[in-house]
Image (cartoon, helix red, strand yellow):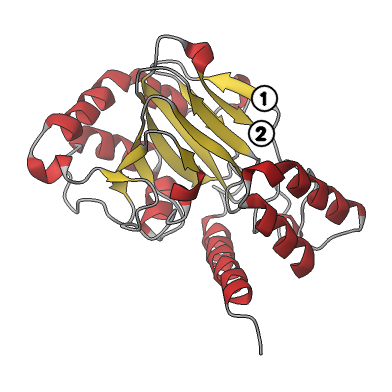
Amino acid sequence: DDAYMELMLSMEEVEADKILARHVANLAIANGNCCGWVDPMQRPGYMASSTVQLSSVPICPLEQRPIWCNELERNYGRILDEYNNTSRGTPMMTNQWMDVGCGRRGSGHDDHSVVSGRGWKEYVLFGTGAIESDYDAPFTKKLLRQHLPDAVTLAQEGGGEVIFSRLSPRTHIKPHCGPTNLRWTAHLGLVIPKSKSDCRIRVGNEWKSWSTGKILLFDDSFEHEVRNDTDEERVVLLIRLWHPELTSRTVLASQLVQEAIAKKEESVQKRYNPPV
């Protein structure tokens, strides 16, 4: 499995090689690989299926969404107000905005490599780089602690983040797979360009557009990309959260995410510090 993983990862770094990366995943699957992959479009560096069976679906159907989605959508207006406050408030807040992948938070330090265009910025609410107090977004943080406490804990333990995510006009986030199928990603649409057909996300083989005040919930271990081909910004509240089948097994989930982090570090060491 190390050989398949190394070959696949080397191809992931070159956008033109994505088809080859899928082909390598297909070969690994056909040959009974130990990477755990079952779909060539879902090829994270760590697949939990060998330890615990998790269902795989690129985009969560509306009828299967958890109840907290309704709470965030109901309070979209107040969350938007707090986003605006971070963008136009005190210098301490506006200075918290940073380029995605700039290295100021522990996770996602390679994310800059998938950005093409005018830029992608983030404001961390929970996770490395967040302001320790709640004065920047008191309502949003309270709401998340109340309805998504596991996501807050995941971010604080280094397994994810909760951020305001602002994608500049004419920017492309190139196709890539998230690091593990242990977690999903939620986007609450805050500022969405008028031309939805020109601002979209692809997860697996399916293209979707955001809607203002609505949640899009997906498994980012599937290959995904984002295109903003408009002259407007796209802003979402981005939340990393446990795969829904792990939320009732928090202790196991914590153990698995630490295993995933260790596995990622091990693969980096193997790649850049080979044995002599």
| Type of amino acid under label 1 | Glu
- Answer with mark 2 or mark 1, whichever residue precedes in sequence: 2
Residue 18 locus on image (x, y percent)? 70, 43
Question: What residue did someone put label 1 on?
Answer: 206
Which residue, given by chain and number where applicable, does mark 2 sit on?
A: 58
Provide residue 116's location: percent of width, then percent of height. Answer: 47, 38
Q: How packed is label 2: few (under 14 Cα within 10 Å), some, or many (20 or more)?
A: many
State if disc 1 and disc 2 touch (CB < 8 Å).
Answer: yes
- Residue at image position (45%, 15%) is 211
Mark 1: few, some, or many residues within 10 Å (few <14, many ≥20)?
A: few
Residue 33, image x and y in percent? 84, 60
Q: Is residue 227 above or below residue 155?
A: above
- Quick one: which residue is furthest to the left in this view? 90
> Mark 2: which secondary structure?
loop
Using the image as rendered, state which of residue 104 and residue 130 is in the foreground: 104
**Helix, strand or loop for disc 1:** strand
The circle drawn on residue 118 is none
Work out which quarter of the rendered image holds the C terminus and state it. bottom right
Residue located farthest toward the bottom when viewing the structure as drawn: 276
Above or below, 267 against 221 in this view is below
Question: Residue at the spot x=71%, y=64% of the render?
Answer: 6
Q: Is residue 53 above or below residue 72?
A: below
Give the amino acid type for the residue marked by disc 2 in the picture.
Pro
